[in-house]
Image (tube, rainbow, N blue to C red):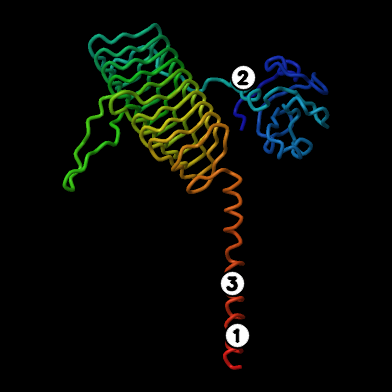
């Protein structure tokens, strides 16, 4: 995992992450790695309890753990969140191997009345249409398109080949990965005599602060008002968000989630991979929808759903357990049918 070297004592590393050393704080750490791949000199982390047996088996010289780990054969650093602490170490000591564009590349095309804040960077062959506003220290890589009257906040990063249509509003510290399209037309048609007539989509998309959007995501503009992505929400690759969808703060959406039009998703909602949601329903705050679920009705807050169609998790588990018993039940019914036929034959003979 580690392509770079460090040279710090375990105590020095613990100070970087506000951790507590248990064991020899003077040992020298020279690299970072996963708990299975680690070798002598590396520091690793243990966040998932199911990997606890690896704490004694790993070849790492030290392990970052949760606060409730009180002893170990190896030196440890106890922290509130081992995964986050490890990520912080990597980000602090890893060299920056990729440098983004600096300044405005001569091949970039800027329209009229474009407003750029200090230290904005725009890469080669990017097109910025009229009346666009891009605030301080935002970086836009090559081959991007920013439509007219769009506003982009501070310290955002837009990777190559992103298309952002007209009148879109993007907050501060937003990250948008390659291939994503923001503000494409919503899928709206009126059918008359077998022909599908396009309904104009004249709304916008509004993206809050600290949002991250993966590669090849599509977020459609609203029909009239706005499609909203709340502050702190993180969206994985290949997600489709339809027109007029309202997504709250700090949601998590894994790959291939699809949300139909005018659905309202609350705060802190987790949608696992390939979840599909019909339109015009609501998902309550802190709800969890497990992978490959098909949601066709509103889901209350503080709940967990699973299945197709999605059901409360305990109900879904019972249904699934029943499905696993179907082969045995089939043979039981077949055997009972055979015995009934034999009994009926005997009674008929009498």
Disc 2, SS: helix
Rendering quarter of residue 64: top right
Q: Nearer the viewer, residue 219 or 126?
A: 219
Mark toward the viewer: 2 or 3: 3
Which residue lies under the disc numbered 1? 342
Q: Residue at image x 59%, y 21%? A: 91
Q: Which residue is mark 2?
A: 93
Q: Which of disc 2 and disc 1 is earlier in sequence?
A: 2
> At 37% from the left edge and 32% from the top edge, which residue is drawn?
262
Does 187 sit above or below residue 15?
Answer: below
Q: Residues within 10 Å of mark 3 (few under 14, many from 20)?
A: few
Q: Is residue 150 left or right of residue 91?
A: left
Q: Residue furthest bottom?
A: 349
Pick the front one: 126 or 305: 305
Dot 1 and dot 3 residues touching (CB under 8 Å): no
Instruction: Point out which mark residue 287 bears.
Output: none
């Amino acid at each position: 995992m580690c392509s770079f070297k460090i040279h710090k004592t375990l105590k020095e590393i613990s100070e970087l992450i506000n951790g507590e050393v248990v064991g020899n704080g003077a040992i020298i750490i020279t690299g970072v790695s996963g708990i299975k791949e680690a070798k002598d000199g590396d520091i690793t982390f243990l966040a998932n309890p199911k990997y606890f047996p690896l704490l004694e088996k790993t070849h790492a010289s030290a392990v970052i753990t949760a606060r409730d780990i009180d002893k170990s054969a190896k030196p440890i650093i106890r922290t509130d969140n081992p995964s986050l602490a490890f990520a912080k170490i990597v980000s602090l000591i890893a060299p920056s191997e990729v440098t983004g564009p600096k300044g405005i590349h001569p091949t970039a095309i800027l329209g009229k009345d474009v407003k750029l804040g200090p230290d904005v960077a725009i890469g080669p062959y990017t097109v910025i249409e009229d009346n666009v506003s891009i605030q301080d220290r935002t970086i836009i890589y090559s081959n991007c398109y920013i439509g007219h009257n769009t506003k982009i906040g501070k310290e955002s990063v837009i990777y190559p080949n992103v298309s952002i249509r007209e009148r879109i509003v993007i907050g501060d510290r937003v990250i948008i990965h390659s291939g994503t399209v923001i503000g494409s037309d919503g899928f709206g048609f009126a059918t008359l005599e077998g022909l599908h007539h396009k309904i104009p989509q004249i709304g916008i998309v509004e993206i809050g602060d600290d949002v991250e959007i993966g590669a090849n995501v599509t977020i459609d503009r609203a029909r009239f008002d706005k499609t909203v992505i709340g502050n702190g929400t993180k969206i994985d690759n290949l997600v489709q968000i339809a027109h007029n969808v309202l997504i709250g703060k700090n949601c998590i959406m894994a790959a291939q989630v699809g949300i139909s039009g005018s659905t309202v998703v609350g705060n802190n909602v987790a949608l696992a991979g390939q979840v599909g949601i019909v339109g015009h329903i609501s998902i309550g705050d802190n709800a969890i929808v497990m992978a490959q679920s098909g949601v066709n009705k509103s889901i209350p807050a503080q709940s967990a759903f699973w299945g197709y169609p999605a059901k409360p998790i305990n109900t879904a588990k019972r249904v699934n357990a029943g499905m696993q018993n179907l082969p045995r039940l089939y043979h039981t019914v077949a055997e009972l049918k055979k015995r009934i036929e034999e009994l009926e034959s005997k009674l008929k003979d009498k």
